[in-house]
Image: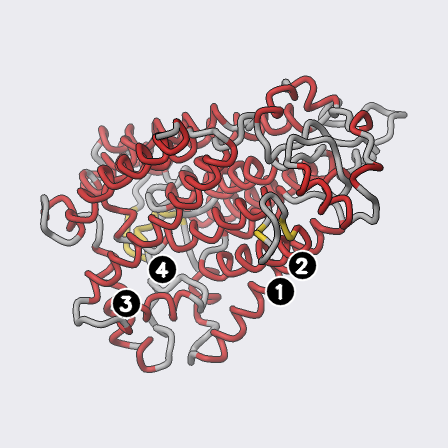
Amino acid sequence: MSQLNRRTVYVVLGWFASRIPLYLMTTGHLWAWYGRRSIGDIIVYTRWVDGALKHGALPVGDNSWQYPPLVGPLLLLPKALPGADYQGQFVRLAFIADAIVILVLLLTARRRESWLGPWFWILSVPFLGPLIYGRFDVFSAMPVVAALAILGRGVPLPGAEAGQKQLNGRRWIAGSLIGIGTAIKIWPGLTVFGLPRTKRGWQTIATAVSAAVAVTVICMLSFRNGSWFLHTQGHRGIEVESIWAVPFLLARRAGIWHGRIHGHYGSLEVLGFGAGFAGKVAIASTVLVFALLAWWWWRKQWRPTVVADATLVATLLMIVTSRVISPQYLIWLLATAAFCLLSKDTSQRRSALLILVSLPVTQWIFPYNFTSLIHFHLSTILALTLRDALLIAAAAIGFIDLWRDTVAGPFLPWRGRSSAPVSDASADAPSATTEPAEETEVVAREEGVTAQGIDAGQAVATPAHQSAGAGTSSGDPAVPAGSTPA
């Protein structure tokens, strides 16, 4: 057996060894007391399905319904499968979605000969416990990972020889997957920050937006009360696990704040003096970090690794500035970080490590000590403070590393110097890569030139990439040797 196949077998065995216990916990066959703590939301899903969704309506009047309309058909799917056990069918579908994620990571790892990504996904998820099979967040992670893989390589052209790809079609497929993921949860839409400022990049963004809008509108028209989620989202407050809740929890413990924690709009929220103002600050901070990401996007020098790296950083920034942080949000981070680690020249190794360290603390808070948190026990408040601090550090370090890796020059250009961005034309133009010769010819034909007319000497690494060590990309067949300056 070759080394490649042997590593593949190890990954498959490692995934089954880590997931079968989690599956048995959620189905009640192993440590049922442990699994039941993580799958309480499935009971809520069942109530929504039986009370409204199967009758063609979204759960109007239920403030815990916070989701876009596409979640309705997703939650109805376990009900449509054979068998009367909704919980069991939901867990099985989540297990299949998890398997698809590892399959995509494995296939990409085989091509790139970089195995850290699959092992990160295999080893990190158990630190969250059976939660992955008790929430539907893995269903939104699945199209994101697939889209990142497609954007990195392209899809096979039927009947083509080995190595040839249909590069023209991949952006439409990837954009559609991003749009579908966005229609389930908002965060997959953050993938657009990693796309290049080129014709193909804009086409991918347009496809993602069109797919998200089309799917959402169709579902809104298919279900009664289709716009209810807009009402509930607009009234959300500061959730008890968010970074904005920590000062209130510490102040309550010190006796200088006298608010309370109460179930409100789908989560346990901090209610009392200052909470409303904190919610406005949270929204303003989210707008600010998105403006920061837009400034980076305008200044960046693009290469394929940037797509996954930017998706991870944008998701981190959205989570830490959000009014709500739930433990299942870390599933988003784990899937994206795993794909980042498939690239040998990723800039997000430090942020991925900080996310990994935050997982045991997260599980210690929920489900084991969540009751202690809402009763203001100091140990749990300190644990929450540590977890949120780790996520803030991951977001800050991730953005700094991404900026240093992709932007040449200072944050604010000096007076008299041009602030125009370096072109991302290399995303559309052929460059010197280590891809097979057949695929190079396909790329060349797309741009109206022949492979024989490509001058590999014209592919020059950008200053930002050179400073980050661009030579490491030569071992990754999906990463060009450099970007072409404007």
- The residue shown at (57%, 51%) is 155
Residue 78: which disc?
3
Instruction: Please identify the residue farthest to the right as the structure is shown.
Output: 416
Q: Earlier in the sequence, mark 2 or mark 4?
A: 2
What amino acid type is highlighted by mark number 3?
Answer: Pro
Q: In the visual, does 141 lie left or right of 326? A: right
Residue 306 in the image: state x and y as whole percent: 61, 35
Residue 244 in the image: state x and y as whole percent: 42, 39
Residues under numbered marks 3 and 2 in contact, where contact means CB atoms less than 8 Å apart: no
What amino acid type is highlighted by mark number 1?
Answer: Ser
Observer able to see residue 374: no
Q: Where does label 2 land, which residue?
A: 206
Q: Earlier in the sequence, mark 1 or mark 3?
A: 3
Does dot 4 land on a helix, a strand or a loop?
loop
Disc 2 versus disc 4: nearer the observer = 2
- How was this image coloured? secondary structure
Q: Quadrant of residue 233?
A: bottom left
Residue 210: which disc?
1
Tell me the distance, in whole angstroms, between the alpha carbons under discs 3 and 4.
25 Å
Seen from the viewer's position, the closer of residues 468 and 431 is 431
- The residue shown at (38%, 34%) is 5
Tell me the distance, in whole angstroms, between the alpha carbons under discs 2 and 1.
6 Å
What amino acid type is highlighted by mark number 2?
Answer: Ala
Residues under numbered marks 1 and 4 in contact, where contact means CB atoms less than 8 Å apart: no
